[in-house]
Image: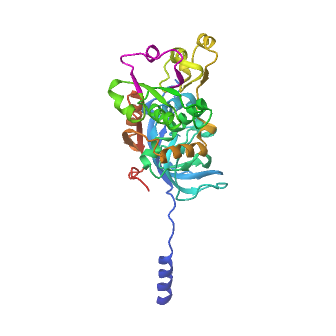
């Protein structure tokens, strides 16, 4: 009997059992519905939650990092009335696949992935990426660029995919057709703006002009801006000549921007803005019927893995990087939101979900 017990013990000890995800996790949530359609930080809490199970076409990702986008609190105001509560928050992520659901063919356990969880369903419900684990549609995830740390990869998806959507629309593809294109990026120091400067250059723009405060001039020049307009001193629409710019990429979204921008856009040029409030008036459109206008929402097809893979190629070619202004841990989600809402961020606000997530993985 002693021999038998020893043999069984040795046999069990020799078997390696792969540990699966835990049953519970920490996740940032809105705890209650806001009937006034406002985003209230006192209703944002980090709570214990059940680790989700991936459904058909989904993978379960151990989330290492995410980030705060300005739209992340606005989506609560737009769709929150229809949610059940408590409701998980967050759209961007970088992490590691820990299990796969049925129907998944591209990704496998152990893959390091990144993306923006904004399929049509995820865009309405939020992807729940401000959590230690999240079930994400395989269709939106790409393999993380090896040259990016998890912190960098978790900060790029939404702003880079929005930029790719905006500029590839203006270019008619992944590269400008002409070698003499001028792009004006309004708000060059923000998350979307500082990425937009680099993307415009990567897509072949000859000249990139941007607006920012004079104190950030060297920062935007280091990203590829050829000309900087200090908005504290000059209005871009007073400085730039009529019909001198091919593309205006508005990353600020102030009311009246379209009316100011239209006169400086070349014949058949393009105006793209992140916010509907910045779209031109009917009077401006009548005067410049030739200008093409777009306000991308970057949901659905915008976040498909083919798009994030195109962004990855820019990263690996050394043409795109992300600047992280500050990093907060998941438990400090309210402080992170406060920082974002204040509106003075240079680059991105990173959200660290896993403590060792800032390690560069090669």
Which one is nearer the viewer's eye here, 131 or 162?
162
Percent coordinates x, y for residue 225 in the rendering? 42, 31
Percent coordinates x, y for residue 278 in the rendering? 53, 20
Which one is nearer the viewer's eye here, 185 or 138?
185
> With 225 as the anchor, is 301 left or right in this view?
right
Asked if residue 96 is positioned above or below residue 312 in the image, the reply reads below
The C terminus - image quarter:
bottom left
Query: Looking at this rendering, what residue extends furthest in the left direction?
Result: 215
Q: Kindly identify the residue that appears in the image at 58 percent across and 42 percent down.
A: 307
Q: Kindly identify the residue that appears in the image at 47 percent across and 81 percent down.
A: 10
Q: Which residues are magenta?
A: 227-250
The reply to whether residue 81 is visible in this rendering is: no
Percent coordinates x, y for residue 35 in the rendering? 53, 26
> With 341 as the anchor, is 179 left or right in this view?
right
How has the structure been colored for display?
Answer: rainbow
Task: Please tell me in which quadrant of the rendered image residue 284 appears.
Answer: top right
């Amino acid at each position: 009997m002693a021999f038998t017990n020893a043999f069984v013990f040795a046999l069990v000890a020799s078997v390696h059992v792969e540990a699966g995800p835990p049953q519970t996790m920490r996740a940032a949530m809105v705890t209650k519905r806001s009937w006034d359609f406002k985003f209230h930080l006192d209703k944002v809490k980090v709570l214990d939650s059940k680790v989700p199970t991936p459904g058909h076409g989904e993978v379960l990702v151990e989330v290492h990092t995410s980030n705060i986008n300005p739209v992340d609190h606005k989506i609560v105001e737009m769709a929150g009335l229809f949610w059940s509560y408590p409701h998980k928050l967050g759209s961007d992520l970088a992490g590691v696949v820990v299990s796969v659901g049925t129907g998944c063919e591209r990704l496998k356990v152990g893959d390091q992935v990144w993306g923006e969880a904004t399929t049509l369903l995820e865009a309405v419900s939020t992807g729940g990426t401000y959590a230690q684990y999240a079930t994400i549609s395989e269709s939106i995830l790409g393999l993380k660029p090896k040259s990016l740390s998890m912190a960098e990869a978790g900060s790029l998806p939404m702003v880079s995919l929005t930029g790719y959507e905006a500029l590839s629309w203006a270019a008619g593809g992944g590269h400008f057709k002409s070698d003499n294109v001028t792009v004006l990026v309004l708000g060059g120091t923000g998350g979307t703006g500082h990425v937009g400067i680099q993307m415009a250059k990567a897509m072949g723009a000859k000249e990139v002009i941007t607006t920012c405060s004079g104190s950030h001039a060297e920062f935007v020049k280091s990203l590829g801006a050829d000309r900087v307009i200090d908005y504290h001193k000059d209005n871009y629409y007073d400085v730039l000549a009529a019909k001198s710019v091919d593309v205006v990429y508005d990353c600020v979204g102030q009311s009246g921007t379209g009316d100011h921008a239209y006169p400086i856009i070349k014949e058949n040029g393009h105006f793209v803005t992140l916010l509907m409030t910045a779209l031109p008036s009917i009077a401006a459109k009548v005067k410049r019927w030739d200008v093409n206008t777009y306000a991308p929402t970057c949901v659905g097809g915008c976040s498909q893995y083919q798009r994030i893979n195109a962004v990855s190629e820019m990263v690996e070619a050394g043409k795109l990087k992300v600047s992280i202004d500050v990093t907060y841990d998941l438990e400090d989600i309210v402080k992170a939101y406060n920082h974002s809402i204040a509106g003075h961020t240079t680059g991105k606000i990173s959200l660290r979900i896993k403590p060792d997530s800032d390690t560069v993985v090669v």
